[in-house]
Image (cartoon, grey):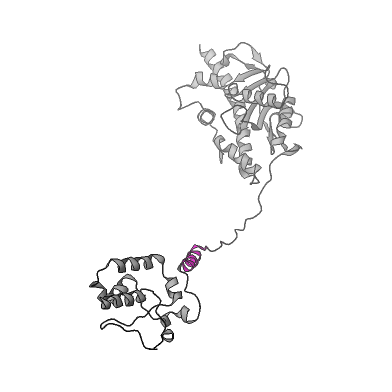
């Protein structure tokens, strides 16, 4: 039994127990060891502290549960349960220098920081942004774009194509179209551009089609734009649009109401060309959109045209400090829309006159 106890003590010293120092013994002799048991190579307190706690607990539990016959193989058991536990203290470089054992978590953090670093990309050099817009500023944040082009003015316009009686003076007609921030309507949608065209007599150029466009470059300029458009209207003005009776006119009425301004378009005559066009050309082409009508009926082909669906993004990009390139294309798109309305009106009048003459 005494041999077994000595073996257990030797195994415990190998697992990290504190061995009595040689100079503390009264007789100065080495501790008696049974035959076949290797000398105890107990680790220093610093080495034992550096070992994970789960390894120490695992070794103590294993020693308590093993039978006495198994304890004779103490060296092999210690090497299996605690790899490196029997190493001499002098083999630990950090302990030999008098320092503490290296922290594995600190080494892992340094490794992750090294792998997590990304090289800083070089700065992107951009040229100057083109913020120039056509026209002139007539109020803070409000620009007016005005052009004229030669256009023959008929003496009178019959309204038979619209199933209405009588005639109107061509100089009383005002073609208009809006560019808005969306198609949903309601109080959240606003018009940032209003385009209008009318037949105008110029002393130097003769009869021309005058195109005027109001464009706001700030949110605060909307009341000024609405007031400027109201000055273009007279009591005898006849508004002419394409689906404007259902969309453009109600939208402008809402904006006038929100701006606390009087509604100048509610009492005016309104000629919507969408319905006469559908009655005459329905089924001839895939649809009766204005782009289809001007391409198939009027033979107008647009070049570098920006679709109307991209107009809100172009305006918002300019408000956020972007370039004015796409917003200038929106102005060109709106300009062509009102010119197309003038040509379409004359074409419908002529087509109705030809149909009446044939019958």
Q: Position of residue 82 (x, y in %)?
A: 34, 71
Q: Position of residue 185 (x, y in %)?
A: 59, 27
Residue 20: quadrant of the picture: bottom left
Segment tinted magenta in the rendering: 105-127
Q: Residue at x 30, y 78 (%)?
A: 6
Question: Does the stretch in magenta take in 115?
Answer: yes
Q: Residue at x 73, y 21 (%)?
A: 262
Residue 12, relative to residue 54: is it above or below?
A: below
Q: Position of residue 106 (x, y in %)?
A: 49, 67
Q: Is residue 275 visible?
A: yes
Q: Report the residue that reaches farthest toward the bottom.
A: 28
The answer to whether residue 324 is left or right of residue 59 is right
Q: Report the residue that reaches farthest toward the left.
A: 69
Residue 191, relative to residue 41: is it above or below?
A: above
Residue 185, relative to residue 141: is it above or below?
A: above
Frontmost residue, 277 versus 255: 255
Frontmost residue, 292 versus 82: 82
The answer to whether residue 260 is left or right of residue 34 is right
Question: Does the stretch in magenta take in 269?
Answer: no
Residue 336: quadrant of the picture: top right
Q: Residue at x 68, y 20 (%)?
A: 265
Q: Is residue 84 visible?
A: no
Frontmost residue, 151 versus 181: 181
Frontmost residue, 93 versus 274: 93
The answer to whether residue 200 is left or right of residue 347 is right
Numbered marks: total: 0
Q: Position of residue 253 (x, y in %)?
A: 66, 23
Residue 261, relative to residue 166: is it above or below?
A: below
């Amino acid at each position: 039994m005494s041999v077994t106890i000595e073996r257990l003590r030797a195994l415990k010293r190998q697992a990290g127990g504190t061995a009595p120092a040689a100079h503390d013994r009264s007789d100065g002799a080495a501790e008696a060891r049974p035959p076949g048991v290797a000398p105890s190579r107990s680790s220093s307190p610093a080495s034992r502290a550096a070992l994970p706690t789960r390894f120490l607990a695992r070794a103590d539990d294993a020693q308590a549960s093993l039978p006495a016959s198994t304890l004779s193989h103490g060296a092999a058991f210690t090497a299996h349960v605690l790899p490196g536990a029997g190493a001499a203290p002098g083999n630990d470089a950090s302990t030999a220098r008098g320092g503490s054992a290296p922290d594995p978590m600190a080494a892992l953090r340094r490794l992750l920081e090294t792998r997590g670093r990304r090289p800083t990309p070089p700065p992107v050099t951009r040229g100057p942004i083109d913020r120039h817009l056509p026209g002139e500023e007539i109020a803070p944040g409000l620009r007016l774009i005005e052009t004229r082009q030669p256009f023959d003015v008929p003496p009178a316009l019959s309204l038979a194509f619209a199933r209405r009686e009588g005639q109107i003076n061509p100089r009383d007609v005002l073609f208009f179209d809006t560019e808005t921030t969306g198609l949903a309507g309601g109080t959240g949608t606003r018009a940032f551009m209003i385009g209008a065209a009318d037949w105008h007599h110029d002393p130097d150029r003769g009869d021309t089609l005058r195109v005027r466009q109001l464009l706001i470059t700030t949110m605060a300029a909307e009341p000024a734009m609405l007031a400027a458009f109201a000055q273009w209207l007279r009591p005898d003005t006849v508004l002419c649009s394409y689906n404007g009776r259902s969309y453009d006119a109600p939208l402008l009425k809402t904006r006038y109401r929100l701006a606390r301004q009087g509604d100048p378009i509610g009492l005016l005559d309104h000629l919507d060309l969408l319905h006469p066009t559908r009655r005459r050309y329905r089924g001839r082409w895939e649809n009766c959109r204005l782009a289809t009508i001007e391409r198939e009926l009027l033979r107008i082909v647009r070049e570098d045209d920006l679709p109307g669906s991209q107009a809100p993004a172009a305006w918002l990009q300019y408000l956020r400090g972007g370039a004015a390139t796409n917003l200038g294309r929106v102005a060109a798109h709106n300009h062509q829309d009102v010119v197309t309305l003038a040509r379409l009106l004359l074409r419908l009048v002529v087509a109705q006159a030809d149909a009446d003459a044939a019958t």
